[in-house]
Image (spheres, grey):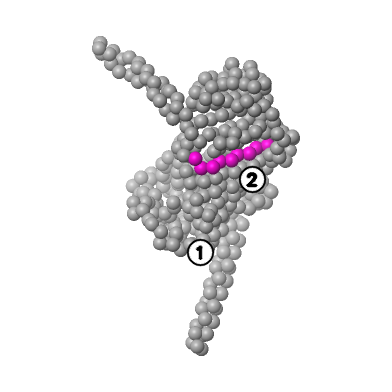
Amino acid sequence: MKWLKKTFIILTGLIAVLAISLFIYKEIRASKAKDLMIPSNTQALIQLNVDGLVSELMGNAISNPNTYFFGKRDSTRVKKPKLWETGLAIPSTLFLFSDKKESDQYYTVQRVSDINRFKRFLKSNMRIDLDSVSTAVEGGFSYFQKKNLALLMNDERIAFSIGRDSTDQSPKLRALLQDNQSTWVNALNWSKQHTEDRKGDILWSNVDKNWFTFDFLNGSVHVDGLLKSDKWRLSDAPKQLKPIPNAVLSAYLDADLSEWIKAQDSLLHRLNVPVDSIYQYYGGYADLHWLAQDVKQEESIVSYEYDDNFEMKEVVQLQEIDAPNLLLRLKASPHLLGYLPEKLFYKFNKSNQADLISLFTGKEGSTDTIFDKAKLVFNLNYSKSPSVTRHLSWLPFFDRWQKIKLEGRARDQRTMQLHGYLILPKEKIHALFQLLND
């Protein structure tokens, strides 16, 4: 038995040494992340807790080895990237910055540890052969751009652009790489100043001190946020209409959106919605209910064909489609009914009861006119439904969510505090693993 005792002591010691080493290594990486810099004109920032997520995934993998290591694998699926195979010196905290506070275009500058490994990583995981598709840029850089991703690099550093802007990003990326960073500011300090020192697996913030945090837990993602705007006025005495009992998705907002509506002039004009009329008649409350069963509607399909005289003519055919069963209720003057178009993506019927307007794709609207007191100025609830999933399939990962709940409370008339969660199918499996692997 002595050898068993010695073996146990040795193993315990090795595990302790390994744990201490990993802790020290993690602290060193975290310390280095505190020195990372971003441009001084940064207006919005995304902060990704790389080491925290990796540690959570490792712990969850130990608890669920069958799911992580022995589950079914699709042989045709593209191999998922591994951080240690990227050829980049990825820090413990990754920062992506933007020079616009409401931007969907973000940038980051990273150090290259092994240029050949990085090229192999792109080729095997993303099917991008940089040696074949990149172009030379003045200054000794190589440039590649495809859809939402652009990168400019040399053997030492690389700058990424991620977002919807498909214009040439090379001038912006080259400026970032050639900047000596003498005027840049500390990224972590910038984040703390604009987020009330919040922490999360993913943290977004902007210069107006709006922020969102996303925490990935086992089976769910928790969301917190703070939104400020001078274009809305939140109710200081929240109220809501009685919810529709069989709705699979329901939401309401009790706020004066007049200034926000005026700011959406170009968008509403494209939808053939009269901005001035909505601004004038909208009463400050709206809710939406999505019922489980779709409804049938007819849609005009325009095509062109040659007649007997070989002249092109327009042919209009009616086609039956499945439309979502929606009910939208607005507190507004009945005069607004006369200004709203018949079709907004789908055909809506209209009705009103006193100062409440109902727009609905189904057979009947709502007769409720009595408001109840509420604690929230905003509330959204969703339970997974084939109808909603089908019509919103264009949203990334939307088919994964089993339940969504978001709540908004008014700090003051211009500031909303948000809290909520999104539920995934497997309650014991880390949310990030479910989103990226299922």
Q: Which residue is mark 1?
A: 63
How many neighbours does mark 1 have within 10 angstroms: few (below 14), some (14-19), or many (20 or more)?
few
Q: Secondary structure at mark 2?
A: strand
Which secondary structure class fits the magenta region best? strand
Q: Residue at x 30, y 18 (%)?
A: 305
Question: What residue range appears in magenta?
Answer: 377-385
Q: Secondary structure at mark 1?
A: helix
Q: Mark 2 or mark 1: which comes first in sequence?
A: 1
Q: Position of residue 201 (x, y in %)?
A: 57, 53
Q: Position of residue 136 (x, y in %)?
A: 39, 45
Asked if the residue under mark 1 is in contact with the one under mark 2, i.e. CB atoms within 8 Å, the reply is no
- Is 320 or 415 nearer to us in this picture? 320
Q: Residue furthest top?
A: 309
224 versus 316 height, above or below: below
- Is 337 or 221 nearer to us in this picture? 337
Residue kind at label 2, given as amino acid type: His
Q: Which mark is residue 54?
A: none
106 versus 111 height, above or below: above
Q: Is residue 166 magenta?
A: no
How many neighbours does mark 2 have within 10 angstroms: few (below 14), some (14-19), or many (20 or more)?
some
Q: Residue at x 59, y 36 (%)?
A: 245
Q: Which mark is residue 419?
A: 2
352 versus 187 height, above or below: above
Q: Position of residue 97 (x, y in %)?
A: 56, 45
Q: Residue at x 66, y 40 (%)?
A: 408
